């Protein structure tokens, strides 16, 4: 059995996440008051059939009267019940949330004639802080479309995996901003840049010519070995701290060449040591026309 608690900002993709979990066979309950969580857990434990089922629960600020500040104490209840669970929090930057509400013409749960949309989003950030602080996994959906978010939920949360950390290597471009959900960030902008080789400019770190170019660069290999050594040294300490998920972000200027190459190389190496190691290239999934 696995229990996933889904929370996050309005407009961040909670409904999409719950739908993805439901499609993966989870029994989903949306908009549960946090105070009812212990009762639900008790009901799950009563039924023997629940041992072979998965559950997903949506908790957010639509019930404005509830006190989300009690959620951290509920974590203790879950641990005492010895139920395997994951707290998932979906986030996005304010500008993107405003854009999504403008496109859908939906009303934010906290907005009214006295509080405009941006103020409502800022208030929601504050109210949901206990949920975010308790999260095992935070996903920034700012740069994700619906399909990408569904795939990410499926691969990182819904699909069962062996005990231990779920590791994600994510490449990105600093000119588009670092991912807010990264646990560790490495900067590869000091490395030789294939962008300045005309025949490599339109290729990416997934292409053979770029791989051969970076394979031959001493500094690139030194950074790879340093990151590999650091992570190899500290994995056990992250795991000892009961970390279920960790995201390692590697950035270069545009997120097309160096960061992609390093993430692929690190994912290939650590897949031999850990059971659940994934890779994602943020900028390769976006509609950026510049390549750096």
Image (cartoon, grey):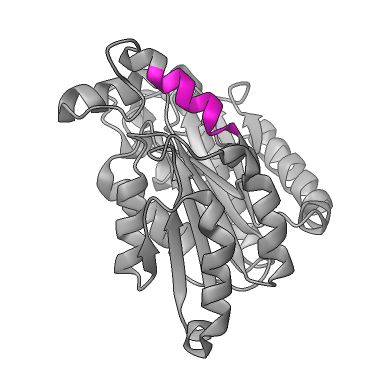
Give the farthest residue toward the front: 65
Tell me which residue sits at (33%, 53%) in the image: 150
Viewer-proximal residue among 234 and 49 = 49
Is any part of residue 168 visible from this angle? yes
Q: Is residue 196 visible?
A: no
The residue lying toward the viewer, choosing from 30 and 253, is 30
Q: Which quadrant of the figure has residue 30?
A: bottom left
In the rendered structure, the answer to whether residue 93 lies left or right of residue 289 reads: right
Please give the name of the residue rendered at 57% of the width and 48% of the height, measured from the top-left corner: 137
Residue under the image location 36 percent in, 32 percent down? 143
Q: Quadrant of the C terminus?
A: top left
Q: Position of residue 14 (x, y in %)?
A: 36, 46
Span colored in magenta: 120-129
Work out which quarter of the rendered image holds the N terminus and state it: bottom right
Q: Position of residue 149 (x, y in %)?
A: 35, 47
The picture places residue 8, in percent across and down from the top left corner, at 45, 39
The reply, left or right, for residue 3 in relation to residue 84 is left
Give above or below for 191 relative to 23: above
Q: Is residue 86 magenta?
A: no
Image position, residue 160 (x, y; %): 51, 72
């Amino acid at each position: 059995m696995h229990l996933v608690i889904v929370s996050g900002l309005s407009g961040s993709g909670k409904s999409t996440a719950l739908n993805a979990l439901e499609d993966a066979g989870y029994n989903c309950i949306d908009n549960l008051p946090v105070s009812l969580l212990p009762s639900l857990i008790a009901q799950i434990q009563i039924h023997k059939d629940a041992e072979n089922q998965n559950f997903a629960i949506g908790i957010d600020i639509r019930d404005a009267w509830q006190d989300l500040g009690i959620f951290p104490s509920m974590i203790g209840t879950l641990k005492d019940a010895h139920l395997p669970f994951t707290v998932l929090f979906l986030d996005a930057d304010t500008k993107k949330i405003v854009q999504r509400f403008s496109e859908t013409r939906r009303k934010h749960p906290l907005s009214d004639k006295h509080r405009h949309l941006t103020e409502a989003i800022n208030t929601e950030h504050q109210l949901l802080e206990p949920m975010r602080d308790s999260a095992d996994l935070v996903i920034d959906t700012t740069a994700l479309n619906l399909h990408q978010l569904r795939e990410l939920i499926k691969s990182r949360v819904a699909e069962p995996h062996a005990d231990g950390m779920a590791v994600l290597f994510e490449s990105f471009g600093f000119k588009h901003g670092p991912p807010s959900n990264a646990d560790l960030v490495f900067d590869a902008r000091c490395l030789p840049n294939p962008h300045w080789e005309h025949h490599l400019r339109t290729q990416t770190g997934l292409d053979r010519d770029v791989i051969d170019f970076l394979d031959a660069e001493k500094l690139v290999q030194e950074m790879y070995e340093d990151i590999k050594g650091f992570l190899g040294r500290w994995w056990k300490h992250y795991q000892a701290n009961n970390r279920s998920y960790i995201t390692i972000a590697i950035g270069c200027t545009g997120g097309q060449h160096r960061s992609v190459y390093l993430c692929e190389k690190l994912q290939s190496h650590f897949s031999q040591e850990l059971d659940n190691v994934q890779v994602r290239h943020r900028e390769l999934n976006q509609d950026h026309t510049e390549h750096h």
